[in-house]
Amino acid sequence: MEIAENEAVLRDVTAAYAFPGAPVRVTPHGAGHINDTYCVVCRSGEGKETRFILQGLSPAAFPRPEEVMENFIGVTSHLRKKIEAAGGDPLRETLDLLPTRDGRPYHTDPAGKVWRLVRYIENTVCLRRATPETFEAAGRAFGRFQFLLRDYPAGTLRETVPGFHDTGRRFSAFLAALREDKLRRAKDAEAEIRFALERERDCFAATDALREGKLPLRVTHNDTKLDNVLFDKDTMEGICVIDLDTVMPGLSLYDFGDAIRYGANHCAEDEEDLSKVSFDLDLYARFTRGFLTGAQGVFTETELAYFPWGAKLMTLECGIRFLTDYLEGDRYFRIHDPGQNLRRCRTQFKLVRDMEAQWEEMQRVICGAAAALKGKNE
Ligand code: GN1
Ligand code: MG
């Protein structure tokens, strides 16, 4: 078996699973910042190759991995039933978790890290940057995810990362990191620190609305980056939502907003040249249309009115998290060089600034999309 890295651990993990044939290759896969993800290729006696995705959960992000897996199983079982009832193919439209040799849902390696194995969904692609068409298709996929989970008992889900999108709490963590400034990095991020401090009040917009009973709690994905959708290679339709680690009770504006944060611009999250980074209102409009179409009318009018807040808050929050991690010495997000978290923070704050400058247009787009959909359904 060829193993690109981490050989002893991956030998132990692959031995825990009964593959169809012999595993012949294990290679790093994808571009996530948190978990360790590998593709395992197996070859049968007749030479047929089958692929699997093997993932080791990050103990820093998920201190209770068994709860992550409990959610994963609950949600994928629900989705499977819904997809079957709608005449779809559950093996393409949701993740299929494979048990270990001894029938467990995951393997724990000697160091205590939890690993899971899912079937690779063939003939699909994962996109880093969007076109208007693919972004609208991603919107439909994430909207449909909301639609299919609208009747899932949210109270039975574990809160795998408490306060994941509690922006006020993220702000407090930033203040603590700033106070400590243990690597003396604050001096290199003065403008970014000021930017965050000036927006403290904003950080409470969503949680205040929730507390006041204006917004319903739903089952949300919470990490709706474009590359968390698999697209069918032939149709380029978004067929499967992946990365279910942060599925938790949440607000629809989180899913809307995080997708916009990542996808409604033309640059990588760590683009150095900020003159290239700008919020694209057309992409925002396309995603909105897709998201509302896929969700088939599940959102209330107040939820829709909060979608621009979702975009701004998720972007501000993510920038604050990158900045916090930079100040704390890059302990959470995987980095490739020491300035990467600060660069990531800067792109996010540039996008927030752009959104603030186009706030009214952002609101108009949501009203227009909601009215168009209503017209179509009448
Ligand atoms: C992390 O693992 P990945 O790349 O899907 C993070 C998200 C951030 C994102 C920023 C569990 O997602 O919350 O928005 O990086 N996931 C976790 O790219 O913290
Ligand atoms: Mg993720």
Image (spheres, rainbow, N blue to C red):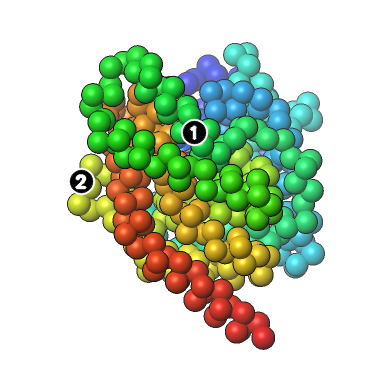
- 92 or 212, which lies in front? 212
Q: On the image, numbered disc 2 is attached to which residue?
A: 273
**Left or right: 14, with 288 as reference point:** right
Q: Is the CB of mark 2 within 8 Å of ligand 1? A: no
Classify 16 as above or below 236: above
- Residue 358 visible to an observer of this rendering: yes
Q: Earlier in the sequence, mark 2 or mark 1?
A: 1
- 275 or 66, which lies in front? 275
Residue at image coords 51%, 39%: 167
Q: Is the CB of mark 1 within 8 Å of ligand 1? A: no
Name which quarter of the figure residue 370 lies in. bottom right
Three-letter residue code for mark 2: Asp
Classify 221 as above or below 191: below
User: Residues at badges 2 and 1 in contact (C-beta under 8 Å)?
Assistant: no
Residue 82 x/y as whole percent: 76, 60
Classify 112 as above or below 358: above
Three-letter residue code for mark 1: Arg
Q: On the image, numbered disc 1 is attached to which residue?
A: 170
